[in-house]
């Protein structure tokens, strides 16, 4: 199998008091090793459910999720997660927060090496000198960077980002986009990014997947034509404008606000 | 603790005592209507050994009742915090139990365990003070944001790891908030038993003897001694909170 993440025909419904609520319906997604896929779609279409399936926190009702040629049945330590809420443990220092996964995942690193790795990652995202601070002393963007370090400290194969930059202001967000590219060069991972921000999706990802409204299925895939790091100027090119227009149109169809018969560009 | 942190509350107490003295003096109240702070000094001088022994009896029984309340309340809070079914099942019972005035329970308990005065007093102190602890622990655990759980669960952590690493420390600020309430409640419980069903033990009994002998300054002196013990125990909890949940205090800016 060449794809690191392979999602085939996944269906999932939540049980509610008023009967099952289908959220995913025939979802297909493949991400090659080292690839970076952004998933966009209308609100409440099941994007977060998708991350839970990949992380093994949920079992799909139907269909299969494969990671590195193995069927996902339960949580696995080769996955790192970061959410919109940075979920810092307020009673720990930043350094100890970043080291948390190493207390759970079996690791060959000695205590000293663990600390060195955490310090190295913090320096990579520009948080050198904040190791011994408490999370409450950091700004939202800094907390999110620390949360990114925590998601990467155990060198996961897959990094799942569930709207990690959603609550940040525009400038901080652009900073973090660039940091993401820098981090990915030094610490390669296969990425799945859930986002509402179309600019973010084409700036960070190699591939953008548009989901339909609930229950979500894969409705459209856009190849950004670039892999790896790119300059922020890339967002201001005519190609970028065209991609954004295409994505916007696809989302409108997904929301049911534009007729579907118009063939995608 | 800085000089300011000690001086400000001490000054407040001195001002309170001065105002109290002035009020009694201005109104010309006799001491059977309202004793003044200057009436209390002779009472303490005369009965200081009784205050020491009975104060100690009240203190240890309150602390033991409180410790049992902490253990039982935390356990109950955990059961209700982790299980929705248990929460639904136990909340009405718990609220109903808490709504019963404990003064009415005192004679029942006193009859049930005749002669076991220490046990009965500890029991009432415990019964009156475990409720806020159980409620705060259960709320703390049941309102844990799902992301906290997911972060650890996605790494394959067990439920007990999640409890020790996240749920327990995250609940500590709520727990200490409830413990501060429970401290004063436990004193009320101890004194209920000591006053309503007196066995000649504890500050409550001293209060009761003041009442029997029409020694009004003594009654007021007991109240102030109780307030003093309450303050001491409260600050013990504050000190523990600083050690175990000091992180929750934001730096003032």
Image (cartoon, coloured by chain):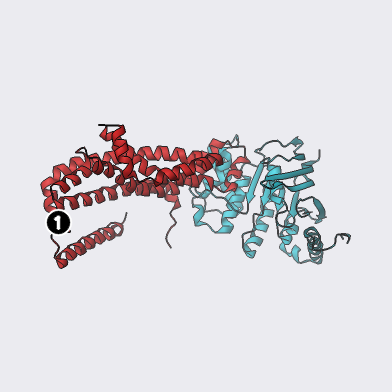
**What residue appears at the point 32 percent right and 43 percent down from the top-left corner?**
B104
What chain does mark 1 sit on? B
Nearer the observer, B121 or A177: B121
Q: Position of residue B14 (x, y in %)?
A: 22, 60
The red one among the chains is: B
Tell me where residue A74 appears, x and y as whole percent. 67, 36
The residue carrying pointer 1 sits among few (fewer than 14), some (14 to 19) or many (20 or more) residues within 10 Å by Cα, namely few
Give left or right: position of A146 versus A56: left
Can you give x and y, in whole percent of width and height, for residue B129 in the image?
Answer: 37, 44
- Relative height, residue B92 to residue A145 (above, below): above
Q: Is residue B124 left or right of residue B223?
A: right
Residue ID for mark 1: B32
Q: Residue sitting at 63 percent across and 51 percent down?
A: A83
Q: Secondary structure at mark 1?
A: loop
Q: Which residue is located at x 40 percent, y 45 percent?
A: B98
Residue sitting at x 43%, y 44%: B96
As drawn, is A155 to the left or to the right of A62?
Answer: left
* Residue B160 seen from this side: yes
* Quarter of the image where the C terminus of chain B is located: bottom left
Which of these two is toward me, A71 or A125? Answer: A71
Q: Nearer the viewer, residue A238 or B30?
A: B30
| Residue B31 rendering spot, x and y as whole percentages | 14, 58
Q: Is residue A188 visible?
A: no
Quarter location, residue A199: bottom right
Chain depicted in cyan: A
Q: Nearer the viewer, residue A16 or B68?
A: A16
Quadrant location of the N terminus of chain B in the rendered image: bottom left
């Amino acid at each position: 199998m060449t794809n690191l993440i392979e999602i085939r025909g996944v269906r999932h419904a939540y049980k509610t008091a008023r009967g099952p609520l289908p959220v995913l319906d025939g979802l297909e997604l493949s991400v090659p090793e080292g690839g970076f896929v952004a998933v966009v779609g209308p609100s409440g279409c099941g994007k977060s459910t998708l991350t839970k399936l990949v992380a093994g926190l949920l079992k799909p009702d139907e269909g299969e999720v494969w990671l590195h040629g193995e069927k996902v049945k339960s949580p696995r330590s080769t996955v790192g997660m970061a959410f919109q809420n940075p979920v810092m443990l307020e009673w720990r220092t930043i350094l100890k927060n970043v080291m948390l996964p190493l207390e759970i995942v079996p690791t060959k690193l000695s205590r000293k090496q663990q600390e060195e790795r955490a310090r190295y990652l913090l320096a990579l995202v520009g948080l050198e000198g904040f190791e011994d601070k408490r999370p409450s002393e950091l700004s939202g963007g800094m907390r999110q960077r620390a949360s990114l370090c925590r998601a990467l400290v155990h060198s996961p194969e897959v990094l799942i980002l569930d709207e990690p930059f959603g609550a940040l202001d525009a400038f901080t967000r652009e900073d973090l986009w660039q940091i993401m590219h820098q981090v990915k060069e030094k610490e390669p991972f296969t990425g799945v990014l859930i986002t509402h921000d179309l600019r973010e999706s084409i700036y960070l990802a190699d591939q953008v997947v548009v989901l339909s409204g609930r229950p979500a299925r894969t409705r459209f895939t856009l190849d950004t034509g670039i892999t790896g790091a790119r300059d922020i100027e890339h967002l201001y090119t005519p190609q970028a404008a065209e991609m954004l227009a295409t994505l916007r149109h696809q989302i409108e169809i997904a929301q049911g606000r534009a007729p579907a018969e118009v063939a995608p560009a | 603790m800085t000089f300011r942190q000690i001086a400000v509350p001490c000054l407040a107490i001195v001002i309170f005592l001065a105002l109290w003295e002035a009020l009694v003096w201005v109104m010309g109240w006799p001491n059977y209507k309202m004793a003044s702070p200057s009436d209390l000094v002779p009472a303490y001088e005369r009965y200081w050994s009784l205050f020491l022994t009975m104060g100690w009896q009240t203190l240890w029984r309150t602390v033991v009742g409180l410790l049992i309340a902490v253990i039982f309340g935390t356990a109950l809070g955990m059961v209700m915090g982790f299980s929705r079914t248990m929460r639904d099942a136990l909340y009405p019972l718990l609220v109903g139990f808490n709504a019963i005035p404990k003064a009415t329970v005192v004679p029942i308990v006193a009859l049930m365990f005749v002669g076991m005065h220490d046990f009965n007093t500890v029991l009432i102190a415990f019964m009156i003070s475990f409720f806020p602890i159980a409620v705060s622990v259960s709320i703390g655990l049941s309102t844990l944001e799902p992301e906290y759980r997911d972060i650890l669960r996605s790494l394959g952590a067990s439920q007990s790891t999640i409890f020790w690493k996240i749920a327990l420390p995250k609940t500590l600020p709520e727990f200490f908030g409830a413990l501060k309430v429970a401290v004063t409640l436990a004193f009320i419980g101890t004194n209920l038993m000591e006053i309503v069903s007196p066995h000649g033990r504890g500050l409550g009994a001293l209060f009761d003897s003041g009442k029997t002998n029409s020694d009004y300054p003594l009654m007021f002196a007991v109240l102030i001694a109780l307030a003093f013990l309450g303050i001491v125990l409260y600050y013990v909890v504050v000190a523990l909170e600083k050690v175990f949940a000091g992180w929750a205090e934001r730096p003032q800016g």
